[in-house]
């Protein structure tokens, strides 16, 4: 019994995964997963967590350390009549102070909560902007995926044409053997077969260029043996669900939240504080000229009224910014709808062409079959036969091209609509 080492198992699994058919949805997922820009998603989330954590600490007590050493030109002096026999010590011109202060806000008014909300909205906006950039990958994947499918269809039709030519060669060889055919006719058919083989070489080379680029996008090997699964036709939709729309809405929401924060900051702030330290002279007793400790505790009211002067204009600026975002959103919807309408017309056109292609293919193949019998019986020349089989081959290729173009238009429509 043969034992499979872990390395052999890994290689077997790798080769098995390559041989499996590749779908369009898998390409979308792999491309987004491996695209370098995707790494920003985790970074945005971590930045949001750090920012919210810092904002949450805003309600904690704040600690301040301050110190100063000064020398002043004069100090307060109190001179009493000599008859009082009292002496009031004078303060030294060099003064020192070092203290620490702990303060706790008593009137938050929801400011920290609003800041956390803004941080969450901004993170969501960054994620949607990232989604918008990643969404553009779908267009590029569509072009590569359906381009490869189109070449596969052309290769299939090229093989059918080569088989028809080979059938003609066999028929002419039979007539030459019977003494009724011409070598020149055989050579014309052989030359056409070589030309068909050359076309196959060109098509395979073009396919490799497409699959190499697709392989880079999805970070998976896509070789000549990799089969691409033809997707089923997608249903058309009139709704637009692009990530850009969510980004526009979040931007408007962010402006609304910023205006609310601006209004909350206009409220007065009330803090409880405790200050303690050392000073010379004593900050709470200037008659104490030595270095002494002290403390002060109480409540402090702070109200910066300068914001009221600009709040009205700030609100108008905020409203103007929101209106600009709304205008951008409406412009995006207008342009997207125009693109959807054009793509819908393309879909209708290809559907009509395919309906006509079916009829043309049936007629051309019927003529081609009849030409094969006539060539075998010597009724027509090799040139006539080649004209008929080439016409049938071209009809099949036209239908294959239109079918892939229809699928591409349908999925481009789906991508444009965001569905």
Image (cartoon, grey):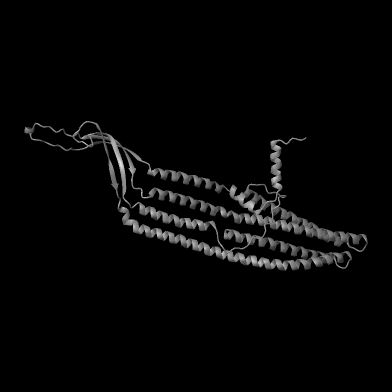
* Residue 47 in the image, given as x and y percentages of width and height: 47, 45
* Residue 358 in the image, given as x and y percentages of width and height: 74, 66
Residue depicted at x 92% and y 59%: 177
Comparing 240 with 157, the one in front is 240
Comparing 357 with 179, the one in front is 357
Residue 191: in sight, yes or no?
Answer: no
Res 187 → quadrant: bottom right
Horizontal relation, residue 20 to residue 39: left or right: right
Comparing 393 with 182, the one in front is 393
Res 142 → quadrant: bottom right
Residue 107: in sight, yes or no?
Answer: yes
Res 321 → quadrant: bottom left
* Residue 67 in the image, given as x and y percentages of width and height: 29, 36
Horizontal relation, residue 301 to residue 358: left or right: left
Horizontal relation, residue 213 to residue 280: left or right: right
* Residue 164 in the image, given as x and y percentages of width and height: 81, 60
Q: How many numbered discs?
A: 0
Residue depicted at x 73% and y 62%: 397
Comparing 316 with 217, the one in front is 316
Q: Which quarter of the figure is the N terminus placed in? A: top right
Residue depicted at x 28% and y 34%: 277
Q: Which quarter of the figure is the C terminus placed in? A: bottom right
The residue positioned farthest toward the right in the image shown: 178
């Amino acid at each position: 019994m043969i034992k499979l080492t872990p390395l052999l198992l890994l290689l077997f699994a790798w080769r098995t995964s390559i041989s499996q058919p590749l779908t369009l949805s898998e390409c979308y997922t792999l491309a987004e997963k491996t695209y370098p820009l995707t790494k920003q998603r985790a970074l945005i989330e971590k930045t949001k967590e750090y920012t919210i954590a810092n904002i949450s600490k805003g309600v904690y007590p704040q600690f301040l350390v301050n110190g100063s050493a000064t020398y002043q030109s004069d100090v307060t002096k109190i001179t009493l009549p000599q008859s009082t026999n009292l002496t009031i010590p004078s303060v030294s011109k060099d003064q020192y102070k070092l203290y620490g202060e702990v303060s706790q806000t008593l009137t938050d008014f929801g400011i920290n909560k609003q800041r956390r909300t803004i941080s969450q909205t901004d993170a969501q906006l960054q994620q949607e902007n990232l989604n918008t950039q990643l969404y553009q990958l779908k267009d590029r994947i569509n072009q590569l995926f359906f381009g490869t499918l189109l070449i596969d269809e052309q290769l299939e039709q090229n093989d059918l044409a080569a088989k028809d030519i080979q059938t003609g060669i066999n028929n002419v060889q039979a007539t030459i053997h019977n003494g009724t055919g011409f070598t020149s006719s055989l050579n014309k058919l052989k030359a056409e077969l070589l030309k068909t083989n050359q076309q196959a070489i060109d098509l395979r080379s073009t396919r490799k260029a497409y699959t190499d680029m697709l392989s880079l996008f999805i970070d998976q090997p896509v070789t000549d043996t990799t089969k691409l699964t033809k997707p089923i036709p997608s249903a058309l939709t009139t709704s637009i669900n692009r990530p850009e729309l969510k980004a526009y809405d979040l931007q408007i929401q962010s402006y609304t939240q910023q205006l609310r924060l601006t209004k909350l900051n206009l409220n007065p702030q009330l803090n409880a504080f405790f200050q303690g330290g050392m000073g010379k002279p004593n900050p709470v007793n200037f008659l104490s000229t030595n270095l002494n400790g002290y403390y002060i505790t109480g409540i402090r009211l702070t109200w910066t009224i300068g914001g009221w002067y600009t709040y009205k204009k700030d609100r108008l600026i905020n409203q103007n910014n929101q209106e600009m975002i709304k205008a951008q959103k409406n412009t995006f919807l207008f342009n997207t709808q125009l693109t959807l309408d054009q793509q819908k017309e393309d879909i209708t056109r290809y559907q009509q062409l395919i309906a006509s292609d079916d009829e043309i293919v049936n007629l051309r193949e019927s003529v081609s079959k009849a030409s094969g019998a006539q060539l075998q019986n010597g009724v027509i020349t090799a040139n006539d036969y080649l004209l008929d089989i080439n016409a049938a081959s071209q009809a099949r290729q036209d239908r294959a091209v239109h079918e892939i173009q229809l699928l591409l238009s349908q999925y481009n429509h789906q991508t444009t609509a965001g569905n």
